[in-house]
Each structure stands twice: as structure tokens, then as C-alpha cells.
Amino acid sequence: MVEKIAYCENCNADVEYNVRTEIIDCDMDGIKFAYEAVIANCKNCGSEVYVDEINDINIIRAYSSQKRRLDDQAEKEENEEQSIFKEE
Ligand SMILES: [Zn+2]
């Protein structure tokens, strides 16, 4: 990200923006997970602005976080299966 310029709908102009992170809680098909999203805000009015690169980062972060959660769940189920075998 060289130039921090994005279009702001509120200002109806290309504006500079600030970047911050925010923890977003998701619930997708009953799978709950959280990820640290990058949020861009217009320097003029503070409205959230859409930035392609940042959106891509968020999609990747959300995806990997969801995948981690699914892997954890799979591992947990596997352990439960193993404990069933032990009881036999
Ligand atoms: Zn603005």
C-alpha cells in the first residue's frame, strides 16, 4: 500500500484514509470464529471506506480463522473418538 487513497461515498471524493484493526465475530453455518479485520476510515469524515487490498486481507484472515476453527473441531472430534476406543 503506497498511497493511502480510497473513494469515500460520504465525501464523494478520493480521500486519504486511516487504518485500524477490529476483532470481528463471525457465525458461519453455526461455526463461531473471530478474526482481526483491517478497517479503513476516511480521514475527512471518519466513514468507513472500501479498499480492494484491505478487503482481500480481510477475506484471507476470515477464511484462515474459520479454517483453524474447523481444524480444531476436527481434532477435538478425533480425540473424542479415540477416547471411545480406549473405553472398550
Ligand atoms: Zn469521507
Image (cartoon, rainbow, N blue to C red):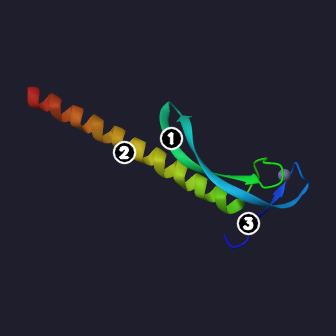
- Residues at badges 3 and 2 in contact (C-beta under 8 Å)? no
- Disc 2 residue type (three-letter): Asp
Q: Nearer the viewer, residue 6 or 28?
A: 6
Q: Earlier in the sequence, mark 3 or mark 2?
A: 3
In which quadrant of the rendered view does residue 26 lie? top right
Residue of label 2: 71
CB at disc 2 and ligand 1 closer than 8 Å? no
- Please state the horizontal and vertical placement of residue 69, each as a whole percent of the image: 41, 42
Q: CA distance from mark 1 to mark 3?
A: 26 Å
In which quadrant of the rendered view does residue 18 lie? bottom right
- Disc 1 residue type (three-letter): Ala
Q: Residues within 10 Å of mark 2 (few under 14, many from 20)?
A: few
Number of the front mark, 1 or 2: 1
- Disc 3 residue type (three-letter): Lys
Q: CA distance from mark 3 to mark 2?
A: 36 Å
Residue placed farthest to the right in the image? 12
